[in-house]
Image (cartoon, rainbow, N blue to C red):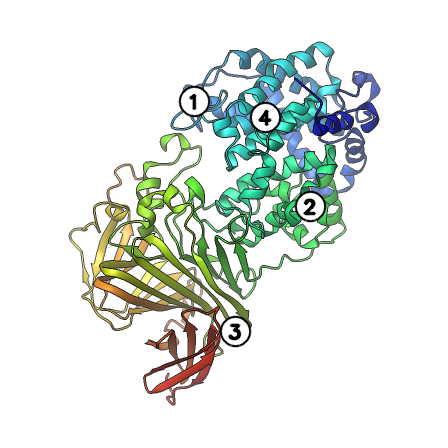
Amino acid sequence: MTRSTPLMLLLAASFSAAALPAVAAAPAATQQPASADSAPVLVTAAQWQQMRSDGTRYPVFTKEQQRAERLVRGMIKAGIDVPVPKDKGGGYTHEQHKRNYQAIQAAGALYRLTGDKVYADYARDLLLGYAKLYPGLGAHPQGRGQIPGRLFWQTLNDSVWLVSAVQGYDAIRDSLSAADRKTIDDNVFRPMADFLSGTPENFDKIHNHATWAVAAVGMTGYVLRDPIYVDKALKGSKRDGSAGFLKQVDQLFSPDGYYEEGPYYQRYALAPFILFANAIERNDPQQGIFKRRDGVLLKAVDALVQSSYGGYFFPINDAILDKGLDTEELVAGIDIAYARTTDARLLSVAKAQKRVLLSPEGLQVAQALAQDKATPFAFVPTLLRDGPDGTEGALAILRMGGEDGQALVMKNTKQGMGHGHFDKLNWLFYDNGQRVVTDYGAARFLNIEAKAGGIYLPENNSWARQTIAHNTLVVNEQSHFGGDWKKGQPLAPTPLLFAIRDDTQIASARMDSAYDGVSFTRTQLLLAHPSLGEPVVLDLLRVTGSKAARYDLPLHFNGHIMDVGFKSQSAVTSRPVLGKANGYQHVWVDASSEPSSEARSLTWLLDGRFYTYRFASTAPSRALIGESGANDPSFNLRREPMLLQRVDGQAATTFYGVLEPHGQYDGTAETVRGANSRIDAIAHYRGKDADVLVLDLAGGKRVAVGIADEPNKPGSHEVNGGGQSWRWDGGWKRFDSSTGKDSK
């Protein structure tokens, strides 16, 4: 192997004795003489010494150290257990190998922080156990449908093991005898790095699985002083820049820091991105990794926090609903981002997490928290562009009322690769700390062996990813792009409008290629008015097609139905199923109406607040009330309600509606107030090149919003209807007036 490239020479220089401080973290009597090729490089000896000296002064750091001590002491008591891999996710061997890498990482940190050789000895003995096991392993016996790992059923988990374990190994490596160090180097870390980097179908992907793999190999390269591994990690297995970490940073994030698979996977991918970037900065600062693409990795931390409500990430694409800001991966992201930026807003997130890394960055956060430097994180209306150049759609987040107020999320993003769902121009709504208009997320019970071993359930494909499981347009009962993510990957929506003012926020986008010959444009607003108790959501979806079709518009909501404001026929003795395929087979139909063009309503109650949804369409539509869970013999699906508007036999139609939070129900005091909607009517009028939505409010007030078809083009617009005329210049305009009525 040649070591003559400039990068290799640079790495060799960074590994020299002169470049690294001497080890001083543990008492001399308990430590092997240090040499330049074994001293820690992911966290330097001087940094460990500072943490050991100062960490006990800061409560959050002390609690994290105590947490690690409880973990490792429990593992030491249980004894060394390095089982032959045999179980799928959630099984005994899977969970034991997971516990082991957590213990190796924690034990390494504790050795440095306490000087107690028992921690180094335990980590050493665990790794010697792997040195006996790993060389004889082949493909995992439970590998299914993906590249199998050696320790785990998928390679991804092997990468996670290595990212964690190599950090613990770095901390103890200079305490080992030369023989033990060579045994562990040659029988654990080198073969694992060779396996990962020697699997280009995984290692060279532009995907979160590959991010974990390149981070694992690159960090191992720094620890083992092997610049070949580092070069492969940065540039791909061919070392030509066609793949690898740098390419992933350039391709997977938008200029705003949005990760194309969505917040759930941004949370997961953030750990290897940030941890490996930190290792690069420590050992190869000339890369300027945290400055790359205008600091996109640090922007990614901010974008991820913005992509949350009530502490939980927006569950778009293959997301599990209970992942939030306290996740371990974001602990790493917050600590390292704060150390790089000293942005006091991040400290409020760290304060809520109640955790820090046992690292210099964690110490810095703990110190700042102890000094009460935290300021509130401002959750604000945000447009997060998608695609490496920011030209492939966007996630529009509208907010009013602060952190637990109203948040309207409009998903106008690109496909999101294989984890993407077929839901262009989908939306979610949060209010009063609750998920009101919902997204199912992923059909999966992570690592629960009883549910298919914790992997994605069959219903993830048959329901969760299908368009009918989302709040967007379905044509002829077919999912967007025919349910083919590879077809959808290069076809993103076109954002048209994003505008913010105190009482009105608006976002709009168009999708032209989800169906052949069909284009649909959606505009949504978050609108406040003194006559309304809370801001309301206005929704306008206009669809045009080349031929007559069936248009379905679902709304998935959370709560208990209070009032069905339209005549319907209920299915009380049997439950018909909505359809036969593309997710329709999983919907029970509980009630349905006759076609009508009149506005109708549905009211439900959620956590003490009422929600009334008024909806209509320009062509006669049926209204159906349903519930997920049909054709589900294994009870894999959650039972969740939905409302469906259906227009048949039209080439074009416009759906419009308003969702109003109102009132309060106090079950303890047995009181109800504001249970009736404060919106009397909704109307829609169409002009030559624009629409107007009109709300008549209780008390005689009226609000109208004009929306141009092409809001980015200058020009004047006029719409007439209901005895009124609205004229405006530009993309949109709000009109406030009186109806002349004194409605009560």
Q: State if disc 3 and disc 4 touch (CB < 8 Å).
A: no
Decide which of tag 2 and tag 4 comes sooner along the chain.
Answer: 4
Q: Secondary structure at mark 3?
A: loop
Q: Position of residue 195 (x, y in %)?
A: 54, 20
Which corner quadrant of the image does residue 212 belong to? top right
Q: CA distance from mark 1 to mark 4?
A: 19 Å
Judge depth for marks 1 and 2 and give the one in front.
Answer: 2
Number of other residues with Cα within 10 Å of mark 3, as a class: few under 14, some 14 to 19, many 20 or more? few
The residue to which callout 1 is attached is 87
Number of other residues with Cα within 10 Å of mark 1, as a class: few under 14, some 14 to 19, many 20 or more? many
The amino acid beneath tag 2 is Lys
Residue 259 lies left or right of residue 551; in this view the side is: right
The residue to which callout 4 is attached is 162
Taking depth in this image into account, of 307 and 53 the one nearest to the observer is 307
The residue to which callout 3 is attached is 503
Number of other residues with Cα within 10 Å of mark 4, as a class: few under 14, some 14 to 19, many 20 or more? many
The residue to which callout 2 is attached is 291
Which corner quadrant of the image does residue 426 belong to? bottom left
Q: CA distance from mark 2 to mark 3?
A: 37 Å
Q: CA distance from mark 3 to mark 1?
A: 55 Å
The amino acid beneath tag 4 is Leu
